[in-house]
Amino acid sequence: MDRLSRYGMVIRLRPERREEYLRLHAAVWPSVERMLLEANIRNFTIFLHDDLLFGYYEYIGDDHAADQARIAADPESQRWWALTDPCQESLTAPGSGWTPMPEIWHLQAG
């Protein structure tokens, strides 16, 4: 049986690319959304505060690394990232992408 895992991550939005990034995410490609769902990702949300993007998703599969590799190998996801990655700047090392955030507290309903 699958179990739910929560993931949070953060990255900086380049101010000069803000409008482009927001425009892209106002109409995420259906093929990109479909791949995320096929890779057992649910409730993917990106929040914006000033120039920080906070991403959150829930994972319902049993092999996160394999599902992440499936997404990374997907040509449509690669095309999407070619547009979105230049809009972002890592908080750690250049080119390292989103920085994972450890979960420190969670309120479970019911």
Image (cartoon, grey):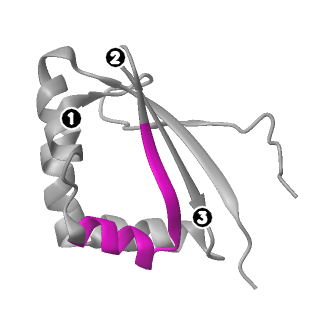
**In the image: residue 89, left or right of residue 86:** right
Q: Residues within 10 Å of mark 2 (few under 14, many from 20)?
A: some
Work out whether residue 27 or residue 39 is closer to the camera in this orientation and state it: 27
Instruction: Give the percent coordinates (x, y) of residue 12.
Output: 35, 23
Q: The C terminus is located in which quarter? A: bottom right
- The 10 Å Cα crowd at callout 3, few under 14, some 14 to 19, many 20 or more, is many
Q: Compared to 47, does 18 lie above or below? A: above
Provide the secondary structure element on which disc 1 rests.
helix
Quick check: is 36 in the magenta stretch? yes
Mark 1 or 3 closer to N-term?
A: 1
Is 8 left, or right, of 95 in this rendering? right
Q: Are marks 2 and 1 in contact (CB under 8 Å)?
A: no
Q: Circle 2 is placed at which residue position? A: 51
**Residue at point 48% right, 72% down?**
67
Magenta residues span: 31-46
Q: CA distance from mark 1 to mark 3?
A: 24 Å
Q: Which residue is mark 3?
A: 59
> What's the amino acid at mark 1?
Leu
- Asked if residue 9 is positioned above or below residue 14 in the image, the reply reads below
Secondary element type, mark 3: strand
Q: Which residue is mark 1?
A: 22
Name the one closer to the observer, 46 or 69: 46
**Image quarter for residue 95?**
top left
The picture places residue 25, in percent across and down from the top left corner, at 23, 45
